[in-house]
Structure formats: structure tokens, C-alpha cells
Image (tube, rainbow, N blue to C red):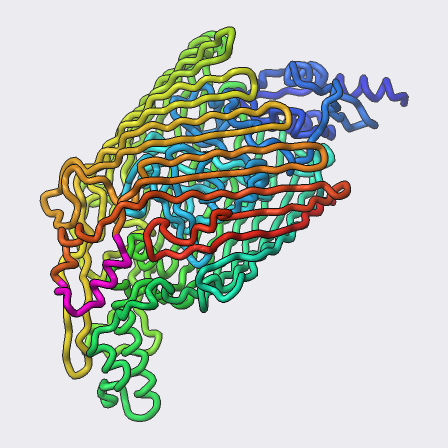
Amino acid sequence: MSASSDESSILSRRVSLHGRGVSLRDALDRLAAAARIRLSYSAELLNLSSPVCLEYESATVSQVLDDLLQNAPVRPVVLGIDQIVLTPSTNHAIQPAEQAPLMKQVGLLDRVVVTGSAVGASQRALPIALDVVSGQQLAQRGASSLSGALDGVVPGLWLWEQSPLSLLARYGSIRGASSFGVSYPKVYVDGIEVANSLLVTHLDPESVSRVEVIRGPQGAALYGADAISGVMNIITRQDGTEGGAARAELRSEGGTTASDYSASSVLAQSHSLSLRTGTGIRSARAGMTVTTIGPFIPGASSQQIAANGGLRFVNPRSVISGTFRFFAQDARTPTSPVLAGIDLWSPSAVAYRQGLILRRSEFGPGPGGDSIARHRMDSLSRLVVLDSSDRQSVRQYTLGVSGTFAQSDRWTHSAVVGIDGYTLRSAAILDGAFPTALDSALRAATGEAIRTTARASAVGQFGDPQQSSATVTLAAEHSFVRDETATLNPFAPQQPLRPGERTSLVETRSNAGLIGQVSASFRESLFLSGGLRVERNTGLSGLGDLSALPMLGVSAVHSFPFGTVKLRSAYGKGIRPPQTSSRAGTLMGLSGNVTPEQQSGIEAGADLFIGKFIAVHATRFDQRASGLIQPVSVYSAAAASDSLPHYRRIMYQLQNVGEITNRGWELQGTLGNGPWSIGTTFSQVDSRVTKLAARYTGDLKPGDRMLEVPARTFGVNAGYVQSKWSMSWRLSRASDWINYDRLALLSAFASQSHDLSEFVGPELRSYWRTYDGVTRVGGRVGVSLVRGMTFTLDGENLLDEQRGEPDNVTVLPGRTLSAGLRVRF
């Protein structure tokens, strides 16, 4: 058979395809599956996230390709009897994936996103501000932590830099405060809700396709309770080796980290291996990353292991994918060296520590009794120490499967089933004298939890998208979580404490929701959206089990000679139960009669697109939060007996603060042209107390700014790419927040001249202080040595900021310089 007859045979094959608003990538893969051909293309030549419409009944492959590839710089070339390659139709230079411009795809108006819709939709119609951080951006920045990936890139969102010894993410602001010190978005991995959002702290750039972020409560109408401040969906890569992509990638990096508290620089290293196979029809991937850092403070260490995997199967009418994630971290966390000069032991506790005055008869004679006595003494001593944890470990896992099925050109069905869980071990079960909100969240999560997620939806699309059309979404979701929190009570004289003795508090919660949404489109210029989620959540108290979460939105798009303008506005309401995995129990056993946290409000914005790679975004938000929960010091305690020494201790209770307003602006601009790309973000937020709850006894007053919320955040990200080398630079800054002067607070607490009444309720206001700000600067340079091999040089924290974020006792690693080698084959 001649080449021309082969070409005619393949291109004349007839297929039937249905589906509206699917991504170009899914359309090409489904075409290959229907025609039983191999379709190869380079991701750098096509905008694979752009939406297309499939309404073909017995159409030829040639006809479908002509429609899908309009204005694309490629042409189909037939190779053999079953392969079509989409080759450049002009002199189009293909850039390696690791050298893709930093901001090239940010700001595109027409791209398919899966967050904020049941089966994926064009971002053109969304009335909310949704940010997308691509895997290419993560790789270009060398970002592996959430703070490194999102700060300065997503306006209105700020994470405090995470110490390698910390197990939890710490959000400073998501459009202000949605809880007291433990604000966080609801986090999903490939549509599977994680058991504890605060435990998702690291990303593997090689496994992440993109991160989609909704800020504010507008996403709660689809995602339900706990989405009070936003939604983050981490979508993993599912591509194979089409287009000549590498089957394997090996990366190894090592360097030194400076520290003011270590005699010399310490070793930091990271190594990873990722594997891919298959085509767009059938693909599989797997990867593993190992990261370690030495004692940047004396006695500290941290080791992390992350593994991930995925499968994808494409048929003419359906796409099925599976995902797997595992993360493990072990850390040794000594007392902060900043506290070295502060004596946090009361005189009697010191005497007790030295003299072992506990009666051995209580625990039995002999060495065994001495051992138990020492253990009890150490446990009691740790009650007054901040950052008392010694060894900590966490294990996380996610396993799930999802699928979409195009019943016709009108109805598309989808389903997601998965589990996510963790096991957390920490010596910091007993809170210190003045635990931070994060310390409390760590204590609440110590133990294990598992969450199951099951969600099904049907999306119907009616009318002509070019004229008037409507989209109807019907969905049902059910999730179940089981928390087992480790507790320890050293104050029960009837039951003497044994070494390592712990009890467990087991809680179960379920959430079942029914969702309905309607979106109307008029000439692809005016879009109206409305939705309601009604759910039964057993974690809600004070409002009953049922809650209704609405969302209303409108957007308008118009093209001018100079570009395209989009105006949008949306209203939403979110709710967070008092009982969550990050707040499973109250502090020190004191129960507070708390009600759920709520937040509602509006956002309005404008987006300007000039050409393909210039975009400017502006958003104004006005949200009101009520019932935010704060650990409040309620009274002090002192104990003395034959078996217990005299010690100083503060008791806490969870209380609702009252009403908080979160108002501000978010600005973002991106520019990408040729080898250069640059992106900037700026946000200003005023998070302020407007009304106190009747039973609140803490240190906040009406008119106060919420603690630990930066008033301004700013970011600049720039990149430059050539055929042989690339570089990227990033700067992010947060400024002007109020927090406790924790160093002064602990010094006063350790002094016997201060009565314990000075550390309760409103008296703590005297320890507030204003923090001016923190600036982070980092960069990466990559040089191509030979085909498939790249040398990289990274710099983190180039300004060597080690303290002051978010308080004056937290210690972070200093300036880190590392070199690495990346090999693709």
C-alpha cells in the first residue's frame, strides 16, 4: 500500500464524538481512541486547555482535525498505517518543558478549569476570581512548598514560610481571616477531599499539572462546609510520552543552608525520580522524591519522602483516571534557641526535677518506679515549655478514581470516589504556656483520621452556545471522616501516668449534600450563574444539621479593538463546623459552647486581556465573617501536693469572637512575549473586629485588626528563556501585621514577679506588637549541557531572613544555595 493510500485511509476513517466545553487535549485523545489511531503532538504547540465542542456523527478524522486545529500552528502528517503526527506548520521552535516561560499561560481567558464546575468549564463564564498555577510555573520556580508555590503568585493568599520542622501549613491570610490563626482553604487532590487541609504542605512539581485556587466563600455552593475561605484543587499530571516527551527524569540537588544558630552551614538535599509511559489514550506515571535538611538549629533534623502515581484511560465517550499519593515526614524539633536565655521552670518544679520528690510507692519500688517517676516529672515540666515537641512524624495518603462519560452532545456524567487519611505522631500533645493556634491545631490532629469521598454529577447543556444556551448541573456528594485524637491527662491521681500512656478520643462526622446549579449564556458575552447546596452535616451544632449554601454570579465579556474586557461579580456563603480534623478537641480539656464559623460576601472585578500574553486583573471583595473561634486564656492554675509540684499554667477555652469584616483589593498583571515573562501581584486587606460575641472574654475589642493578618502582600515573578539556558527570579513580601511579642510574653511568664492574672483575657493586649514585614527573594538558573541534561543553580531566602515571620520566636533556615542536575531520557 502506498503512502498516499495510507494517508487517505486514516484521514477518511469515520467517528462519532459528543461533548461540549471539553478541553482540546481530551478532544484529541478521544478522537484517537474513536479512530483507533496513534495521535502524537507537542504540548508546547497547542493550547490544550482551550475549550472545544464535539458534535460529530459519522464525521471523518480529517474533518474533525480541521475543526479542532483551526489557527493552530500545526498540520497533520500521516506516518504508517495508524499514526498521525501534528507537526509544526511554520518554523515554530519547540522549547523543552522545563524551559517554558514562567507566566506564558496565565491570563488566558478561554481555558478549561475543573474547579468551580462539576465536569470542567471555560473560565470565560466563571463569575469568580479563579487562579491557576501550572506545573510549568512550579518547575520553573523550583517551588516544592505551598508557600513557595503560591505566595506572590495568587493575590489575596499568603502562607507563612514553613520551617522544615513543621508538619502543618500556616495561612496568614486568605482575603483576611476566616478563623483565628488557622484559616485554610478546603483542599482536594484530583477532586478527592483531604482529611486535614493543614497537613498538605508540599508539592512535587514533576507530578502536578496545575493548582486551581478559589478565594472566598463563593465555592461553598459546590464544595460544601469547610470551604468558608476558599477551595484549592491540586490536579496531577496524567500525560504519557506523546510528542517525544521523556519517559524518565532523574533530578538530584544538594547545597548548604546558613543559620545564625549553627556553628557552620548545614547540608540540604533533594532527589527525585519520575517515570511516564503510554500515549494520550493509555498512560501511566509514577514518581518519588526524597528531601532532607540538617540541624539548622542544634538538635533539629527533617526527612521527607513523597511518592505519587496515576493512570488514565480514554475511550470515545469516556475518560477514567486514577491517582495515588503518599507523603511521610519525620522531624526532630528541639526547643527554639531563641528561648535559651529564658528560664521557664518554676522554682518548685526545678527542685522537683532535681530531687525526684515523687513518692516511689505510688509507682512501685525499684528502678521501674524511678523510671515512671522521671517520666511523669518530665511530662509535667513540659507543660510550661513552648515548642515542647521532640520527635514528630506524619504519614499521609490519597487513593481514588474519577471518570466522565459523555452520554450525548447534551448530557455528561461524572463520578469521583476516593479516600484520604493520615497518621500524626507528636510529643506536643500537652500545649505549652502560650500555644499558638498552629500548636493547638497540631495537638488537635495528633492521632489519625481517614476520610472517604463519593460524588456524582450530571451536567446538561441546552441551546446554541453561539446564541443562547443554558447549563444545568445536578450533583450529590457524601463524605465520612473518622478522627482518633490522642490525649494525655497527667492530673488524674486515681490513675497514675505510665510511660507513654495515652488515651484516644474518637469522633465521626458525615456530610451529605445535594447541589443544583444553573448557568445561562447569551451570545458568549453575558453569563448568569446561580447555585444552591443543601447539606446535612453532623459536625454542625447551634444551627441544626441542615445548612443551605447559595451562590449567585454574573459576568460579561466584550471585545474591543485593543483587547477583551471581562466584568464579573459573585456572592457566596460558607460555613465551617466547630469540629474539624484541624480542631478536633478543645485545649487542655476545657469545653467551650461554640457555634459554627460562617462567612458570606461579594466580590467584583474586571479582567483586561490584550493580545495573547498580556492580562490585568482587579478584584474588590467585601466579606463578613461571624463566629470565628479563638483559643482564649480563661484562668490560671497552680497545683501543689505530695505527688504534684507547684507549677505555673494557663488554661484555655475555645470561644466565638463575634463578627469580623474582611475588605480589600487584589491586583494582578502578567506579561509574556518571546523569551521574557513577568507577573506581579498586590493585595490590600483590612480584617477587623466589628462586634464581639456576648460570652467572649478574650483580648480583642471592636475596631481591632485581626491578629497575624498582613495588611499588604506583594509579589514579582520574572523569567527569561533561551534555547540553551533559562532563569527565573521571584520576590514576595508581606507587611504590617499585629501579633504577640511572644519573646516578651514568655519572659514575663517565666518571671515570678508577674502574677498569672496578667496573662488572662484582655491583659494580653499589653503583649501585642506590630511586625513591619518580611521579604523573600529567590531564583533559579538552568543551563542545558547536552540533549536531555540540564544543570541548575538555586537560591532560596537570599536576604537571609531567619526570624520575624510570623512572630519573634519562630526560627527559619537562612540563605540556601544548591546546585543540581536534571537528566531526561
Mark yes or no: residue 204 visible. Answer: yes
In the figure, 379 relative to 566: above or below?
Answer: below
- In this orientation, which residue lies closer to the viewer: 743 or 323? 743
Is residue 135 among what the camera can see? Answer: no
Residue 298 is situated, as x and y percent measured from the top left of the image, at 45, 67
Nearest the eye: 114 or 409: 114
Picture coordinates of residue 804, whole percent (x, y): 36, 51
x and y, in percent, of residue 574 in the image? 29, 35
Quarter of the image holding residue 369? bottom left
Q: Work out which quarter of the rendered image holds the C terminus and state it.
A: top right
List x then y, in percent, for residue 582.
Answer: 33, 51
Q: Residue at x 53, y 57 (%)?
A: 257
Report the residue at 22% width, 67% height from top.
750
Q: Quadrant of the N terminus?
A: top right
- In this rendering, position of residue 143 left or right of residue 744: right
Q: Is residue 315 left or right of residue 614?
A: right
Q: Is residue 767 above or below residue 679?
A: below
**Is 204 rendered above or below residue 300?**
above
Is 110 left or right of 685, judged from the image as shown? right
**Is 744 colored magenta in this rendering?**
yes
Residue 750 vs residue 644, the one in the foreground = 750
Residue lying at the far bottom in this picture: please name it. Answer: 366
- In this picture, which residue range is highlighted in magenta? 741-756
